[in-house]
Amino acid sequence: MTTQTSTVTTASRTACATDAVITGIGLLAPNGADTEEVWASVLAARSGIRPIGRFEPTGPVRLAGEVPDAAFSGAVPSRLRAQTDRWTQMAVAAADAALRDAGLEDPERRPYDPYDMAVVTASSSGGNEFGQRELSRLWTEGPGRVSVYQSIAWFYAATTGQLSIRHGMQGPCGVLVADQAGGLDALAQARRVLRSGTGLVVTGGMEAPLSPYALTCLDSEGTVSHATDPARAYLPFHDDACGYVPGEGGAILVVEDAAAARARGAARVYGRLAGHAATFDAPTGPAGGGLLAAARGALEDAGLEPGDVSVVFADAAGVPAQDSAEASALTALFGPRGVPVTVPKTLTGRLNAGGGPLDTALALLAMRDGVIPPAALPAALSPGHPLDVVVGGPRAADVRSALVLARGAGGFNSAVVLTRAHAAS
C-alpha cells in the first residue's frame, strides 16, 4: 500500500480553503473515442447523431448518439464486462484515460493514501441494458438463467463502486441522481469531499440510455425528438425545435486539491471548479426562475459578476417552452446577446448525467485553446432571438471563465462556474 507523500496533509487541507482544480480529463462520446478526438470533432462540427444501429427500434425514436463498442471495450477486462452494464464499462475506459492524463495511472506512484482518494459519479438511468436483458431471461428462461450480477450491475452506484475497486480509492465515495443536472451536482459534491480533507476525487458522469426499455421510458416524457433527419432532429433555440436526441457517453474528471496537485508536480491544471449552485423548480413556479437562481448562485459562489463570464454552455433542451425559459434566464442575467452561448451537445445528443461533465470538459478545453466551440444549428436563428449562439464554426476568444448549465426532468437545476486555475480565489 502506498503512503501519503504530498507535503500538504489532510489536516492542513481541512484547515484552509480548498481550491478544487481539474488535472485529468477522460471523454467518450458519439463523435469521439478519446478527449482529443471528441474535441476535434466538436470544433469541426462532426456529429455523432445517426439512426440507431444496435437494435431495431420499434417506437417513434429513430435517432440517437451511440458510442461504438470498439471505443471502450479494449479498456475493460473480460471478467468486468460480464459483471457490468456498458454505462459502467464506458466509465472504466474514461476513468483510465483521465488518470493517465493526470499522470496518476500507476497506483504505486500516486502520492495519496487509498483513504485520501474518492469516487463521486452521477447517473440517471443506471445499467438499463443489462437489466432489460436479464429480466427478459427471467420471463423466458426462468430465474436460474438470470446473471448473479443483475443485483448490482443495474444499480446507480455500480460505476462508483467499480471505479473505487479498480483504482483502490477508499475515501468518501457516492453517486448523485438528478437526471441531466446530476452530472454537475457530482462535480460539486467532489469539491465538498476535497474540502472535507480528501486529496483527490474521480468524478463526472457517464450514460448509456439507449436500450429499448430505456428509450420507452425517455419518450414517455414527450420531449424526445421523433425526427428522422439527423441534421434537423435537435435544434435548441430554433423555430423548428422538436425535442432532443438522446445519446451515450460523458466525461470522467480528476479533481484535486490545488496545493496537493502542486506538491506532487501535476503536469497540467485545466482549470478551477470555482462555483456551483443547485435549485429546484416547483411545477407552479415561474418558468426559468430556478435556472436563473442557480446561475446567479454559482457566480456568487465563484466571486464573479455576470460580466466576468466568457461563455455559457447552455442546457438547451430542444423543447420550445424550455428553450424560451432558458433564454429568458440568460437574458435576465447577461442582457440580450450579452455573452456567447454554445451547445456542443447538438453533436452528441443529450447524455443525461454525462452531459454536464462533458460540457465541463469542453469548457476547460476552450480555456486551454482560446476558442469557443460551435453549436450545430442553422446559421440563421429566429429573428430577434435574444441569445448570441455561436454557430457556423469555432469562435476565437480569450476564455477566462465559463458557466455550465444543466436541468433535469422534474425540476432540477444545476450550474457550475469554471475559471482558469491562476484566477484569484
Image (tube, rainbow, N blue to C red):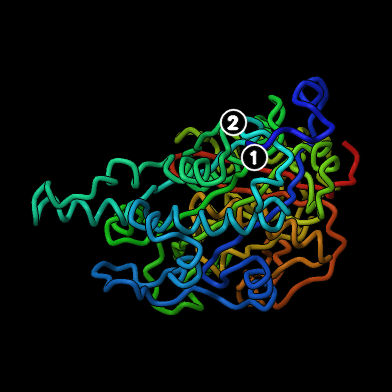
Can residue 293 be seen in the rendering of this structure?
A: no
Whether the residues at callouts 2 and 1 have beta carbons within 8 Å, the answer is yes
- Which residue carries the number 1 mark? 201
Q: Position of residue 423 (x, y in %)?
A: 89, 44
Q: Position of residue 312 (x, y in %)?
A: 71, 54
Which quadrant would residue 168 be assigned to in this image?
top right
Task: Identify the image quadrant of the N terminus.
Answer: top right
- Which residue carries the number 2 mark? 171
Q: Position of residue 263 (x, y in %)?
A: 85, 40
Label 2 crowding class (10 Å Cα cut-off): few <14, some 14-19, many 20+? many
CA separation, marks 2 and 1? 9 Å
| Secondary structure under the numbered disc 2 in the rendered image | loop
Number of disc labels: 2
Front residue of 282/272: it is 272
Instruction: Identify which amino acid the numbered label 2 is placed on.
Output: Gly
Which residue is depicted at the point 17% across and 55% down? 136
Instruction: Identify which amino acid the numbered label 1 is placed on.
Output: Val
Residue at far front of view: 1
Front residue of 418/5: it is 5
Q: Nearer the viewer, mark 2 or mark 1?
A: 2
